[in-house]
Amino acid sequence: MGKRQVYLEDIPLEEAVARWWAALEEAGATAPLPGEPLPVAEALGRVTAEAVWARLSSPHYHAAAMDGYAVRAEDTRGATETTPLRLRVGTQAIPVDTGDPLPPGTNAVIKIEDTQLIAHHASRKSLIANRLSQVAARPSSIEILASVAPWQHVRPMGEDMVASELVLPANHRLRPQDLGAIVGSGHTTVSVRRRPRVAILPTGTELVPPGSEPRPGEIVEYNSIMLAAKVEEWGGEPTRLPPVPDDFEAIKDSVATALDTHDLVVVNAGSSAGSEDYTADVFRELGQVFVHGIAIRPGHPVVLGLARGKPVMGIPGYPVSALLTFDLLAGPLIARWLGQPAPPRPLTLQATLTRKVFSPAGEEEFLRVAVGQVEERLVATPLPRGAGVLMSLVRADGLVRIPRFSQGYDAGDTVTVELLRPSEAIRRSIVVIGSHDLTLDLLADRLAQHHPGLRLTSAHVGSLGGLLALQRNEAHLAGSHLLDEKSGEYNVDYVRRLLPGRRIVLLGFVTRLQGLIVLPGNPKAIRSLDDLTREDVSFINRQRGSGTRVLLDYELKRRSIDPRHIQGYERQEFTHLAVAAAVQSGTADCGLGILAAARALGLDFVPLLEERYDLVIPAEHYESELLQPLLALIRKPEFGAAVEALGGYSAAQMGRVLAKLEEDGNGGTI
Amino acid sequence: MGKRQVYLEDIPLEEAVARWWAALEEAGATAPLPGEPLPVAEALGRVTAEAVWARLSSPHYHAAAMDGYAVRAEDTRGATETTPLRLRVGTQAIPVDTGDPLPPGTNAVIKIEDTQLIAHHASRKSLIANRLSQVAARPSSIEILASVAPWQHVRPMGEDMVASELVLPANHRLRPQDLGAIVGSGHTTVSVRRRPRVAILPTGTELVPPGSEPRPGEIVEYNSIMLAAKVEEWGGEPTRLPPVPDDFEAIKDSVATALDTHDLVVVNAGSSAGSEDYTADVFRELGQVFVHGIAIRPGHPVVLGLARGKPVMGIPGYPVSALLTFDLLAGPLIARWLGQPAPPRPLTLQATLTRKVFSPAGEEEFLRVAVGQVEERLVATPLPRGAGVLMSLVRADGLVRIPRFSQGYDAGDTVTVELLRPSEAIRRSIVVIGSHDLTLDLLADRLAQHHPGLRLTSAHVGSLGGLLALQRNEAHLAGSHLLDEKSGEYNVDYVRRLLPGRRIVLLGFVTRLQGLIVLPGNPKAIRSLDDLTREDVSFINRQRGSGTRVLLDYELKRRSIDPRHIQGYERQEFTHLAVAAAVQSGTADCGLGILAAARALGLDFVPLLEERYDLVIPAEHYESELLQPLLALIRKPEFGAAVEALGGYSAAQMGRVLAKLEEDGNGGTI
């Protein structure tokens, strides 16, 4: 007995789309939607369903384009400032304001600035006042100081548009100027394509509504909010149907009902087992399935069908998969219904990949990357690849497509990035890499608050990873808390070793408390590292090489505590939060970590040790224009105060230059 | 006495903006707007007013990432397909579905595909059904066919986000994935910046509402619709106030009332004289004016002030000026209120200017251009420059900024075009240049209907201008109706003369009727060209060199009619519509023109002559992929039928190759 077949098919994206569209086209389900009349003022962003033809010309008469006098151009020939010509007002020169109809027999306007009154020297303003009040104390003659050509300073009838001409073709997305042109050409309504109606049905017994306090195994349903927002962005009209548990009949009923009033029904299967099978079976019972399983990653278990003459689509439950497949498959369909070309290809740029990415052959992968510009070099750092890591899409600056028959890319390869943000935003991003700390998040928010458009993007690769990234010129600065076990000094030794020959500024940031994470109320009354050797106390450790582990071992040694006497010293977790989770679940009585991790799970915290978390900044970046707003912000006392208000931090060193390393390796703690 | 001073100032754009912003900043009027809580599902496109911090971790427990069995990774070491290992179900291997919490003591999941049941061989589906129905007919043991590493196929707690971490900073415009992340991190509402409220007040006694039949001197008010749409696009909340006539007190009252409830009040002065003066005076009475008159074109008479602590802005009445100045001046302010950086600089491209553009030094000009790609070359054709020609903004593909101290550009100069359309749209544009005809508009609409994304853009430069444009490789095809007076043949002789050495296809398009445009009912009973010499009939002519004039002279000669006997033969107009307008106004009894011009003004038409209007297409374009959809459309009988249904046209030659000219000048009528 071999491995079990899980998906019906595993076909390339292009082929899946082609197969589905062929069926939809045959069923007439891809025709642009009909028009509906709409008041022009409400039609921004809508798409014309038919051409708009001008009903009126604009201007609809020959109009004066200046304030002055309508004249026959021939009468002005030869006039200059030194040889003015005199014209009789009322017959040879008829006063006109901008926009007035040109009196019959005249064919040009002479600007008021090019005339002189003869009868009396009124100021321009009083002249205007006279005109407007129709009190005609007009001069009987004027002198003109310049000649005009025929039709000069005249807006001829139809200059803007001529009745019967094409104002806008069909299938045009309306912009502000288009609305003006439609009204100007004599219309008050415009026929626009009906918005495509898309029903989104979340399914899954594990789903709970937004705002719930989910229990283990429960998932807060938010995919439908994202998918509805996508539909809105595309110009469609989304309906979020109430979630349905994993029940064949219930799903079938909901899909069938939605088909009556929608153009597309999307079933967003829960991530639990068998959900997609229900979707496919429901579609088969109501119609046909053409595709079940596409060779893309994330996003594999997609179902594409046709039911009651309308397209139906099943997309996977993981949020990244859901959004990506919806984008790829529903986007073009909605564009077609709106008479629009396929969504434009995103802008791309070439960047250097910072890490090796292995991708299983056979699936096209959509890798999310953060892109940073370090000096003139663009670097793309892969973000977490899990289909459930929505933050990878929130943080992503772009996507790298890894083709189906590629095994991936090596670090240093040049890759094409499809941008998800304007390249301007990338140019204005400060890339911080290394160990993560909550205060960096605070800094990122403050930067966005005080300097709109300037961004702090952070990648969490640990302190050592951060210094290595600086070595490869992939970041502007790194957050680091590397304790040298020999010197007991933070970061300086590591920087010397890993960044030789570089000018580096070590900038003080925070001193943070590490402590023991314990159950609420600290039932075992754990007070110090010495308590770890108690027989009734079990411990959960961090992985070897992590800063917290280095700190623990350093302190144990200093205190002559033998790790072999600590129950659980060999059990290790990879994050602060995992340590807290182990304590919460009762697997261990305590673990070493930071206050924030304890707080995140509502646990108690016994502060024990201080560690320094510095910013390591190559001098060229420290001195760059890009970083100055950040440095200024760090040095504001109010930022330090906000950091300390978080609890668990001291900001005493914040913004101080702790060391300056020169190219020759000299320099050091100041 | 010198020329009169019309504007208070004439200062460069940057300086005007700087002066105004300095005053606004001092008054605290540029601070980002406060936040308001909004349900997440309604927050697409809104901007965060404060950071969003995760309240929950996601996942909030260690979750199985696959359907299969939760195991201790250590127990699976060494298992392969050929050397399977046996695990006891319930103790060593606990069945889990994707999303289930990982049972305590386990640290990995082995995929169901990598296992074999021992007790009985159930299909996967029945296994799933069993699980879901909680009927536990479970095997007592499984064989595993692969080993797993610790945490493999597990989504560790916090993989996506960790409670307390930053989900989104302030001043972030919310996208679909952001909405998901906010809900996933435990929130149901989000604090977003209040929408900036912008009041738009049209002023001018000449204004009439949309849908009116305007009389000479009246203007349909549509600027407020365009400006409101702009505000909407920027994320603000526009209020279109009822238009106010040119009355100081009325304007003042309306502005003062609007200031109570809006962040910005914009007075859109009518184009008639003195309107801006009212605006400036109103602003002065309610507050202060900092700028009155900016050195840009179009757009000069701008008023920038501050009243009751809020910015006020007066913008000119011509639609292009209104939209352009509003874009330049209000756009950045609204961005600032929303905590956004200044609107991103538009994408640009370099193109070759097709015509000389003279620009008066001292003003920065924003020239609208159509951009076409002819083979690999990008060409920018200036559009009409009048501030009243809104269609120039509708048709524009981009703007060329002519700096303040430049005199303009020469034909052939390379210019930087700020794009108003995606460059994709430009690449997919068929550029037709030459004489304009209504049927080209019909063709443009049909093309947009049947080939979304493909565009026909036309520039109207007359038949001769079109052939010259082809000579310079500035268009894909030209519409031409050039009658050779000697041969009586259309176009061929001109093409031979103007495009020597080029392979050209002359494609039949329409034969159109020229006739005499007369008053409704044809009161003077004008029936033929012979009637033009009647003593009671006056004529209005077209300008020398126009196709219609050539046709008239050719026919008069053929009929031996002496032009000197035609009253008004020497009076000339430049467009069909101007001829019709002259007839309508009674200046002349008749003029030669096309049916559409007569119809546009509700006049009668006496059909007299036929003329051929062909498409002149260089062979390389005729054979190009770009043009094939157009050629196919032209050859569809239904298009010919639609053309004939317009009236005044015959489509008998439509789509026929009338002549093919080879490089050696050979070839000719087929």
Image (spheres, coloured by chain):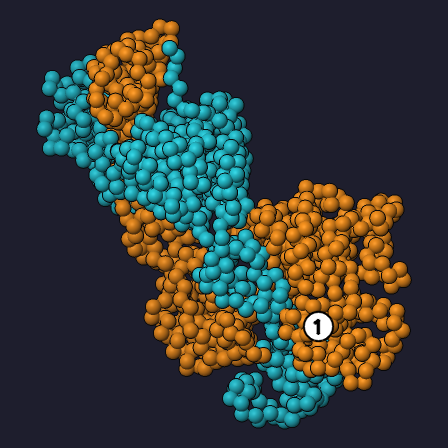
Chain colours: A orange, B cyan
Left or right of A12? Residue A160 is left
Which type of secondary structure does the marked residue at label 1 adopt? strand
Work out whether residue A204 or residue B411 is closer to the camera in this orientation and state it.
A204
Left or right of B478? Residue B663 is right
- Please identify the quarter of the rendering in which residue B394 is found: top left
Q: Is residue B192 above or below residue B652?
A: below
Left or right of A271? Residue A402 is right
Residue at screen point 50% across, 75% down: A208
Q: Look at mark 1 in the image and give the residue it sits on.
A: A605
The quarter of the image holding the N terminus of chain B is top left
Work out whether residue A158 or residue A287 is closer to the camera in this orientation and state it.
A158
Q: Is residue B61 above or below residue A158?
A: below
Q: What percent of the width, then of the height, locates residue A643? A: 67, 58
Q: What percent of the width, then of the height, locates residue A169? A: 35, 45
Q: What percent of the width, then of the height, locates residue A192? A: 33, 52
The residue sitting at the top extreme is A83
Q: State the count of labels.
A: 1
Residue at screen point 50% across, 61% down: B190
Left or right of B423? Residue A617 is right
The chain under label 1 reads: A
Residue B209 visible in image = yes
The quarter of the image holding the C terminus of chain B is top left
Residue at screen point 39% across, 41% down: B265
Residue A353 visible in image = no
The residue carrying pointer 1 sits among few (fewer than 14), some (14 to 19) or many (20 or more) residues within 10 Å by Cα, namely many
Q: Is residue B451 above or below residue B543?
A: below
* Three-letter amino acid code at the position of disc 1: Phe
Residue at screen point 25% across, 23% down: A131
